[in-house]
Image (cartoon, rainbow, N blue to C red):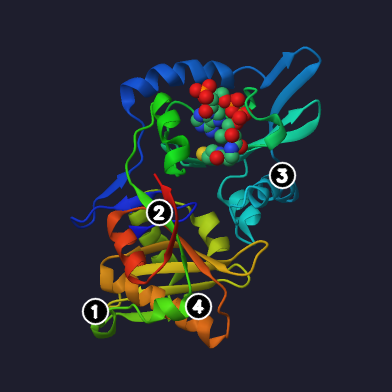
C-alpha cells in the first residue's frame, strides 16, 4: 500500500511490486504537447495593452520561499517548514513565477524526475488577477518545461480541477482525500494487526540510507536521492522505517513540521502491507505524543486503502483529491 503527500506520486498496486503512475493519455497528450512545446521555445512573455506578463524560472531557495511558499500559505494549503529547500534539491528548475509588469502574481511548479516523469503543482494566481488567462499561461509554460518525453502527475482538488485537467489530456488515476488527525483519537483506532506484526520500527539514523533510497526508488518509480537526503533529515521532522524479520526495509514514513501553523504533514507513507502502514503511523504518533506535541497531523490519502485506514483512525476528511 502507498500513500503520498505533495511529492509522492506513485502508488503501489495491490498485486505485489507493481506500481501505477499518473500517466497522461497518450494520443491526446501528443496533440496538446505539440502545441505546448511551441510555448517552450519562445520567451514566456505576453502583452495586452500596457500589461506585460512574463514567466521565468525561480532561481533561489529564498525566492521559492517568498513566492511559492507564501502563495501556498495565502491559499490555506499549509506547506511544510522546509519545503522550499527540498523542492530546490529535488529539481532546481521546478519553480516558475509569473510577473505582471515586474510584480509576481502567479506561480507554479513542475519537478522533473529523470527524463520520463514530472510532478506539477502549486499553480496559484493572486486572487485579484484571476480569470484573465494568467493561470493557463503559467501552467502551459510549466507543462512545456517537462519536455515531450515526460509523463506528468498532478494531485488536485476533485471538484476544482479534475474536468479542466481532462481537457489537457490528463486522466484520473486515484481518488482520495485530505485528512487531519487528532493524535490521541487516532492512537485509539489502530487495529490488533499493528500490535501483532513482527516488523520492527527504526529511526532514520538506525538504518542503511542507501537501502532506504533504493526502497523509495522501487516504490516511487524514479530516483530522487538529492531530494530525499534533505527530506529525511529536515529539522523537526520524524522519519521512521519498517524492517522485517530478514532485515529488509518494508516501509517508511516522514512527518514534517508545517510552515506557519502548528502541526505536521505526513508523506510519503510507503508500506508493503496495511499492518506495516499502521505500525509506522503509530510510531510517529506515539513519538509526537511523547514530546507532548498534540498539534494536528495531516495526510493526503490518495487510494481507497489509504482512505479506509485514515477513516479508521478517525481522521477528519477535509477535501476530496484526485
Ligand atoms: C486555478 C487558477 C490557477 C486559475 O488561474 P486563472 O488565472 O484564474 O485562470 P485563467 O484565467 O488562466 O483560466 C483560463 C482557463 O485555463 C484553465 N486553467 C487555468 N489554470 C489551470 C491549471 N493550473 N490547470 C489546468 N487548467 C487551468 C482555467 O480553468 C480556465 O478554463 P476555462 O476558460 O474553461 O474556465 C486560480 O483560480 C487559482 O489560483 N486558484 C486557487 C489555487 C488552485 O486551486 N490551483 C489549482 C490547483 S492544481
Q: Which residue is mark 3?
A: 67
Viewer-nearest of discs 2 and 1? 2
Q: What is the spatial separation of the Cα atoms under label 1 and label 3, in whole angstroms?
A: 44 Å
Label 4 SS: helix
Where 129 falls versus 194 (above or below)?
Answer: above
Q: Earlier in the sequence, mark 4 or mark 2?
A: 2
Q: Earlier in the sequence, mark 3 or mark 2?
A: 3
Q: What is the spatial separation of the Cα atoms under label 3 and label 2, in whole angstroms?
A: 26 Å
Q: Position of residue 156 (x, y in %)?
A: 46, 43
Q: Which residue is mark 2?
A: 177
Viewer-nearest of discs 4 and 3? 3
Name the residue located 74 percent from the left edge and 46 percent from the top edge. 63
Foreground of the two, 73 or 202: 73
Viewer-nearest of discs 4 and 1? 1
Where 204 falls versus 272 (above or below)?
Answer: below
Q: Earlier in the sequence, mark 4 or mark 1?
A: 1
Foreground of the two, 294 or 276: 294
Where 215 falls versus 55 (above or below)?
Answer: below
Total marks shown come to 4
Label 1 SS: helix
Amino acid at each position: 500500500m502507498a500513500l503520498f503527500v505533495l511529492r509522492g506520486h506513485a502508488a503501489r498496486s495491490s498485486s505485489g511490486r507493481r506500481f501505477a503512475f499518473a500517466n497522461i493519455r497518450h494520443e491526446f497528450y501528443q496533440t496538446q504537447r505539440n502545441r505546448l512545446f511551441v510555448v517552450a521555445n519562445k520567451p514566456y512573455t505576453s502583452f495586452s495593452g500596457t500589461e506585460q506578463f512574463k514567466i521565468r524560472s525561480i532561481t533561489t531557495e529564498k525566492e521559492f520561499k517568498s513566492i511559492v511558499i507564501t502563495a501556498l500559505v495565502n491559499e490555506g494549503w499549509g506547506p511544510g517548514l522546509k519545503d522550499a529547500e527540498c523542492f530546490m534539491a529535488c529539481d532546481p528548475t521546478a519553480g516558475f513565477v509569473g510577473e505582471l509588469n515586474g510584480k509576481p502574481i502567479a506561480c507554479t511548479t513542475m519537478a522533473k524526475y529523470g527524463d520520463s516523469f514530472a510532478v506539477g503543482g502549486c499553480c496559484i494566481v493572486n486572487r485579484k488577477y484571476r480569470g484573465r488567462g494568467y493561470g493557463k499561461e503559467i501552467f502551459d509554460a510549466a507543462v512545456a518545461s517537462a519536455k515531450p518525453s515526460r509523463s506528468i502527475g498532478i494531485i488536485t482538488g476533485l471538484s476544482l480541477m479534475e474536468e479542466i485537467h481532462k481537457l489537457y489530456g490528463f486522466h484520473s488515476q486515484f481518488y482520495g482525500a485530505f485528512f487531519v488527525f487528532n493524535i490521541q483519537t487516532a492512537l485509539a483506532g489502530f487495529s490488533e494487526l499493528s500490535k501483532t506484526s513482527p516488523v520492527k520500527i527504526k529511526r532514520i539514523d538506525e538504518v542503511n540510507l542507501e537501502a532506504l533510497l533504493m526502497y523509495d526508488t522501487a516504490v516511487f518509480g524514479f530516483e530522487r536521492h538529492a531530494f530525499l537526503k534533505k527530506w529525511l533529515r529536515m529539522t523537526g521532522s520524524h522519519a521512521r522505517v519498517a524492517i522485517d524479520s530478514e532485515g529488509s526495509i518494508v516501509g517508511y514514513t516522514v512527518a514534517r513540521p508545517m510552515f506557519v501553523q502548528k502541526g505536521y504533514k505526513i508523506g510519503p507513507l510507503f508500506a508493503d502491507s496495511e499492518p506495516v502502514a499502521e505500525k509506522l503511523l503509530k510510531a510517529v504518533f506515539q513519538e509526537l505524543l511523547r514530546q507532548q506535541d498534540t498539534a494536528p497531523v495531516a495526510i493526503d490519502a490518495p487510494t481507497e486503502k489509504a482512505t479506509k485506514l485514515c477513516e479508521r483512525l478517525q481522521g477528519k476528511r477535509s477535501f476530496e483529491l484526485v
